[in-house]
Image (tube, helix red, strand yellow):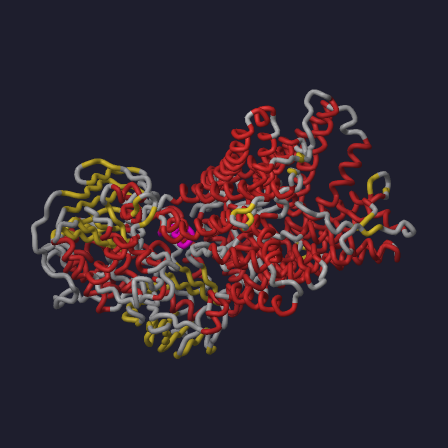
Amino acid sequence: MVDAPTIDREGVSPDVAAFFRRYAALTALIVLLAFNFAVTPHFASWQTLNVNLTQVATIVIVSVGMTLVIATGGIDLSVGSLMAISGAIAPMIFLSSFGRSYPALGDALAFIVPVGVAGLFGLFNGWFITRFQVQPIVGTLVMFIAGRGIGQVLTNGNLQAFKNPTFQFIGLGRIFGVPCQVVIMLALVAAAAWTLRSTLFGRQVLSVGGNERAARLSGVPVAAVKRWVYAISGLCAGIAGLVVVSINSSSDANLVGLGMELDAIAAVAVGGTPFTGGQATVVGTLIGALLIQLVRYTLLANGVPDAAALVVKGAIIAGAVWSQQRSRSA
Amino acid sequence: MSAATANTATSSRRISLAWAARQRVMITLVLLILFGALRYDHFLGAYNVLSVLRYNSMFALTSLGMCFVIMGAGIDLSVGTTAAFASVVSALLSPYGLFPGLLGGLAAGLLVGVINGFMVTRMNIQPFIATLSGMLAASGSGLLLAQNQSVSVSYYTNFTWLGQGDLLGFPAPAWIAALAYVYGSVLLNYTSFGRYVLSVGGNEEAARLMGLPVDRVKFLTYVQSGVFAGLAGVILASQFGAGQPAEGVGWELFSIAAVVVGGTLLTGGVGSVATTLAGVLLLGLIFNVLNFENGLGWISLSAYWQSVVRGVFLMVVVMASSGSARRAIRSA
Amino acid sequence: MADPLLVMGDINKRFQGVQALSAATLEVDPGEIMALVGQNGAGKSTMIKVLTGAYRRDSGSILFAGQPSDFTSPQAAQRGGISTIYQEINLVPFRSVAENVFLGREHRRYGLLDWSRMNTEAAELLRRFAVAIDVRRPLIEFSTAIQQMVAIARAVSFKAQLVIMDEPTSSLDEREVAVLFDVMRRLRAEGVAVIFVGHRLDELYRVCDRVTVMRDGRTVMVSPMADIGKLNLIAAMLGRDLETARAHSTGFSAAQAAAGEVVLSAEGLRIGRKVRDARVEVRERQIVGLTGLLGSGRTEVARAIFGADPPDAGTIEISGRPVLPQEPAEAIALGVAYCSEDRKADGIVPDMSVRENMTLGILPRLTSMGIVDEARQREIVDKFMKRLAIKASSAEQKIRELSGGNQQKVLLARWLCTDPKLLILDEPTRGIDVGAKVEIQALIRELADQGLGVLMISSELEEITEGADRVFVLSDGRTVADLSHAEASASAIIAAMAHGDAEALAEAGHG
């Protein structure tokens, strides 16, 4: 039975307010930067930039994968736990007797294996969700719970402290003066943005999120696409895990990546990628993460306790999503 | 004219998947208890039973609140940090007595619940995002109030009885949780509100068309969840002697897992308070069993295995219920 | 003669540029069963929604039980004595039967719900309809027929004077339909009026007293069921005068070339409940029409051939090779294309551009080393935009901003891009303005002439009679007629839809 007859749309005329709402995050970022330049002491320095970028890099790396997952209309709660696993495996490799005897090989493996394992767990998420038609929240909840446990079991909950300059380059090193993780962050953002824009896979991801039924009827391999995005999310989490333990010169499976999934989701939300899928902006996610970070920094630098920043962060997330929803239905 | 009796073949084929899931969790719980009782000395001993009950009453409370929210097809990520926030508030008020501490904690939970409910029903923000914001806000507020450290509870009043005391041989927190579950069960089965929650979660459009106050029902599930989380926070503070603003991490996901393992569908519309309790006990007992197993020396599984086991449990439950869900839908 | 229970007069309703109802009327007497019929878009559902308050009418009057009525919501209408039973059972599946009956007005004792009283009363209520079930079990455990009874019982327990049933038989089997009709007769005996919105004419003839026919937003006929034959009823629904020949009104011209090899041959298709024994055959350079009334199974047949919903039984051959695609991707690889009926649900990816939507099906072919060749993509898009005269500000415009006709053209282009052997079109000109309709129809002919085999599903008779070289008529899931272009007159097709057998066809054949 048919409802109201199909309505022919002539076209939607842009609204100035809607324009600003769409670019809300960027606008807010610019405003906040301006504010800081004016008010916060010592803001305009390389060091400040450095500190902020370094702190945000890990979140962005994870958020890139999360953006892709959300673009298909899904969500990945397991990223923090996957970071813990990856962060736990790496030292186990280069601190082992094998690793000590063959340091070059050990270090190389310490990069490849943890990321690969995290990617495999991500693939598991994707398989689980598609094979059993499970909601992504529940599907990735399994790895959220079990994953950290796996990391803890591997290390027996012990802290692994180390000093391995080669390996730790990923977190402490610099490339042309820019911290390595920031380079990785920018590379991933660029790669993901390009993928979404120009590759077959990227367009298929967006079509799955945009209208899964239509995508399937057009021959898009929906289940495979979904499996891949979760695998990629796992890979990103793996990389982020390595960065974190490098910075800390230690790996504590109890703590690595704790709360990271929510930070990533927040960055994606604030950045403007809708949770219904079909549209994604990786650059937006970057801006979202920067905005959240900058808010935190602004508050801290101006004497507001860190805890208050949490409250503000919550308000920003709610506000961002609410305003995007309004602009979308306008 | 022949009476149109239900086609018993079809209906027995179409066993409600939630019913099947419910039996599953009860059976598993009973089996686990039997296993533990047979295998370990003192498993059913007073000390073990009471300490398991005492410790898990906090999670029981947050899971109860979560159960109603999920039955209404929502989700509440803030239960953990709300409990932490409430623990701080109640610890701060504990010097004034048991009731001020209790009421303070409940009020803190109520506040978070109201804000969550408002965001979901009035601002139309998806529950996941709305309660994510609530979670951050609660956490921040707790840390602010406590100035980033634990807040000691006053021992000059009888506030600590709530968490550490006993009544007729059973821990006070267990009594509180038990009362809460009785209330929850009555609420679900014998009041309109409970039925409306299930209807809204089961088919929101139909519920609206039937004239049910959909928004009000959803709002109240969040408020209630907040209050229960607040209560959990009060018990946290009084049991451990301090309000802990940094606690509560992962409680929400434990609660979700307990609810889902118990057979309540994450999509809403089906659920039971009793099985949520079973889910809490099941997940909680896994920890207990692992400890005993280690004690026996056959294996030395660290406590960290509990997360793995819980995760696997959830996975198996989800796999099983998705299978029966699809079968039920296909035969409809 | 008793006063009518319901009088809807001169109802107008407009939705953003489309006139859904034009001076439509509807009258129902107390204790009668009134059939309300019409094809898709005729206005029946809009009329019902205006009556129950889901929509506000633009103008016109409604008198119910002697009082002017202006319900603001379906709940208000319910309280006022008009209950609606929707096609999708709008009850809560996991709640018990008794609960569903009483939802919103539960009985209480000492403040708590009185289950025993509700259970007893619900059982009582259902027994009045000769339904004896355990009302404590969840609703979903019962068959759709029983669920519908529960919905009716609920409706009636609100002291309804008028019960509107929207396609109540669509998921019922023979036995269950009989039960439903008994219930309807009981209601009638108790003085309750029923509006039966449906499309299975045989059923309407069995149980209804009168029929109101709507078409294009107007009420075109009201008659006692006994006074009108099926053929004339269908003719009124479709707007065809059985006798007069119409001047050429579509964009279809005669076929330019003779049909070639068989590209599609499907036999004995059985799909779920809807399709019981369908067959269809398409050759190169041929437009084959597949038609039938609403619910006859046309889309199901198309989706089965396309691998979207594989059939339970039957054979499909593409260019002589037996195939059974399990996924659309497989069918596409075999050279089959399917342009679906519901643009919004199955067709467009709303936030993507015209270019993206158009090339979605061939994206892998435009890709080398994972990267989409945008230059080639743009070339193809430009070519088709010109060829199909797609009106958009540019290829980058978001498809949801285009008019229905242009969206349909983009989707058509999507499938043409895949260079198929067989093109299945499901209601290709639905919801499109006249100009675009003619364009698309002419285009379809052109494509066929160039070698394509086209299977065109349509409920518009002109499209079938003028455009199809061969016509298969489906009725209740069976292929009941296989007509050549010469044989496929409107009356023959209608006769096939109505009776589905050879005799009637022979009778009406020479219209």
- Which image quarter holds the N terminus of chain C? bottom left
Q: Residue at x 21, y 63 (%)?
A: C386
- Which image quarter holds the C terminus of chain C? bottom left
The residue most toward the front is A176
Q: Is residue C268 above or below residue C338?
A: above
Q: Quadrant of residue A154?
A: top right
- Give how far across and how far down residue B136 sits, in percent: 65, 55
Position of A256 with respect to A229 (left or right) is right
- Give how far across and how far down residue A34 sits, in percent: 58, 68
Q: Is residue C468 above or below residue C141?
A: below
Q: Residue at x 65, y 63 (%)?
A: A42
User: Which residues lie in the magenta part?
Assistant: A206-214
Q: Residue at x 28, y 68 (%)?
A: C215
**Who is closer to the viewer here, C254 or C85?**
C254
**Who is closer to the viewer here, B142 or C409?**
B142
Position of C9 with respect to C280 (left or right) is right
Position of A219 with respect to A83 (left or right) is left
- Give how far across and how far down residue B163 sits, in percent: 82, 45
The residue most toward the top is B298
Residue A213 magenta-drawn? yes
Residue C120 visible in the current orientation:
no
